[in-house]
Amino acid sequence: MIMGIKKTLKRMSAKPETRTLLELYVGIIVSGMVILGIGLIFARPIWMYVVGVVGGMLGASFQLYNMYDTIERALSVDEGKARGYMTSKSMFRLVVSAIIMIVAYFVGIATFVGAVMGLFSLKISALINPFIKKHLPDFH
């Protein structure tokens, strides 16, 4: 398993666009851990908050990969089709976020707050990317 992780890290570090993807995934994990740490002080029941944050982080990771894949595919078609494709995928990501938040709301308010914070981990990841870029080692 560790060899598989090392291979994946080497492969993702090889190209600049996948390196950025790796940095953003690391940022989601780092910001998610901070969100979890802060929430563990205030949130009750804790397990509901943790479930929400983890669900939100998984949603953020899905959104990141979906954005990467959408851009890759949109670059290979003409401008008119690309615009429609990008719009439809953006709406899809919004629907996924809404579904995550609705399900979390029905589980409990702590789960809802955790899920919203977990979904925001992608935004926080983008903000802390310069720090991650500077401190993340090269895996060549």
Image (tube, helix red, strand yellow):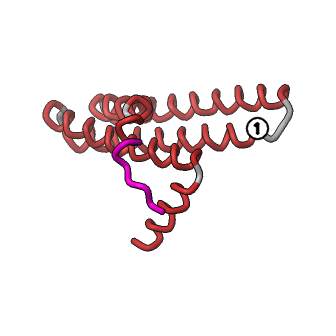
- Left or right? Give the position of 60 relative to 67: left
Give x and y (percent) for residue 105: 38, 29
Callout 1 secondary element? loop
Give x and y (percent) for residue 63: 54, 38
Q: Is residue 134 magenta?
A: yes
Q: Image quarter for residue 55? A: top left
Give x and y (percent) for residue 51: 32, 44
State the extent of the magenta-drawn residues as a range.
Answer: 133-140
- Residue 21 vs 44, above or below: the answer is below
Q: Is residue 27 magenta?
A: no
Asked if one can make out residue 1 in the rendered structure from this viewpoint, the answer is no
- Left or right? Give the position of 52 relative to 22: left
Please count the marks in the image: 1
Image point (27%, 35%), residue name: 35
Q: Image quarter for residue 57? A: top left
Overall secondary structure of the magenta section:
loop
Give the position of the N terminus as an image quadrant: bottom left
Look at label 1 and name its amino acid. Leu
Asked if one can make out residue 78 in the rendered structure from this viewpoint, the answer is yes
- Left or right? Give the position of 77 relative to 101: right
- Left or right? Give the position of 106 relative to 50: right
Image point (13%, 34%), residue name: 41
Image point (27%, 43%), residue name: 33
Observer-nearest of 119 and 14: 14
Which residue, given by chain and number where applicable, does mark 1 sit on? 75
Observer-nearest of 59 and 10: 10
Q: Image quarter for residue 50? A: top left
